[in-house]
Amino acid sequence: MSKAAARALKTRASAPPPSDDRGGNGIQVLARAGSILRTLESHPNGLSLGQIAKSVGLARSTVQRIVAALMAEDFVTSSGPGQVRIGMGLLRIAASIGANSSEIIRPHLLALGEEVGETVDLSVLSGGSVVFVDQVPGRRRLTALSAVGERFPLHCTANGKAVLSCFSPEESEELIEKSLAEHPDFPLANRRRLIDELNDIRRTHLAYDLEEHGAGISAIGTAVIDHFGRPVAVSIPVPTQRFLENRDAFAEKLLGFRRRVEGIVSR
């Protein structure tokens, strides 16, 4: 054996065996991407790359690479110069969380929409928000519509309050804090009044939004617990004048809907 061949053999023998660490690196990248997404979840208006890097404890260059990959999948999107926020791709995935319940409830949702003639929304809990997962548009020319996948606060919407009422007072307090953090544009005017309102909702199964989330629109909502133990909310948003004229009728129809679906979705 030549000296060169011997040296080459010795080098190969002493070198560590090749390892495919792509799996480990991939897991690390996924964990970092998860940290970035969780940070953005608490800041719906968006953050700069520097702010994200500081929050998750990573180098800005690392955050930039991961964010670029997330943007390619529409998991994050631009929210202004140098800022990003949660994208519609991730919201659509979040909306699919309620897919099973949505499929079960869909026929009853259509029937409720036909009964009231107004928009009917189905939503589920996601962090400190409710996410719309299904909708039956109203028949009126002037109606209230929001896109499936949109996120709304828990503390100032009918469907959000209905969801909050499904939790214990301690748990609902924690969710209220999450909601306020995720939706800083909607401050809580009176915490004591909201707590009292949630107690009423637990008793009546009816939640109201009287222009708290948006001027000119009011809503009524209720929630049931599905077979996964998750709250699923149904709400009827209506222009306020028409809502006040039909409030009692909406309440009656919504409670009838609740009685029909409660046993079905909890199986």
Image: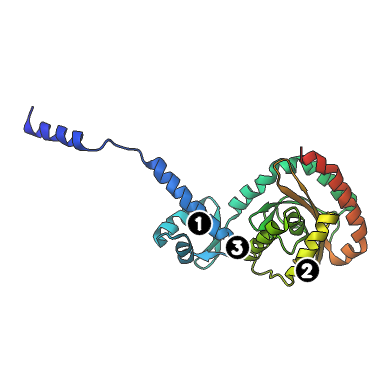
Check disc 1 and report its element: helix, strand or loop: helix
Query: Dot 1 corresponds to which residue?
Result: 36
Q: Residue at x 44, y 45 (%)?
A: 27
Residue type indicated by callout 1: Ile
Label placed on residue 44:
3
Name the side, left or right, on which 94 lies relative to 160.
Answer: left
Label placed on residue 224:
none
Q: Earlier in the sequence, mark 1 or mark 2?
A: 1
Residue type indicated by callout 3: Pro
Q: Residue at x 35, y 38 (%)?
A: 20
Could you say which is closer to the camera, residue 216 or residue 41? 41
Query: Dot 2 corresponds to which residue?
Result: 193
Q: Earlier in the sequence, mark 3 or mark 2?
A: 3
- In percent of width and height, residue 80 lies at 55, 67
Vertically, is 4 above or below 251?
Answer: above
Crowd tier of the residue under label 2, counting other residues whose Cα lies within 10 Å: few below 14, some 14–19, many 20 or above? few
Separation of residues labelled 1 and 2 (CA atoms): 35 Å
Q: In the picture, residue 128 is in which quadrant? A: bottom right
Q: Earlier in the sequence, mark 3 or mark 1?
A: 1
Quadrant of the image containing the C terminus: top right
- In percent of width and height, residue 49 lies at 47, 63
- Residue 199 shows up from this direction: yes
Residue type indicated by callout 2: Arg
Crowd tier of the residue under label 1, counting other residues whose Cα lies within 10 Å: few below 14, some 14–19, many 20 or above? many
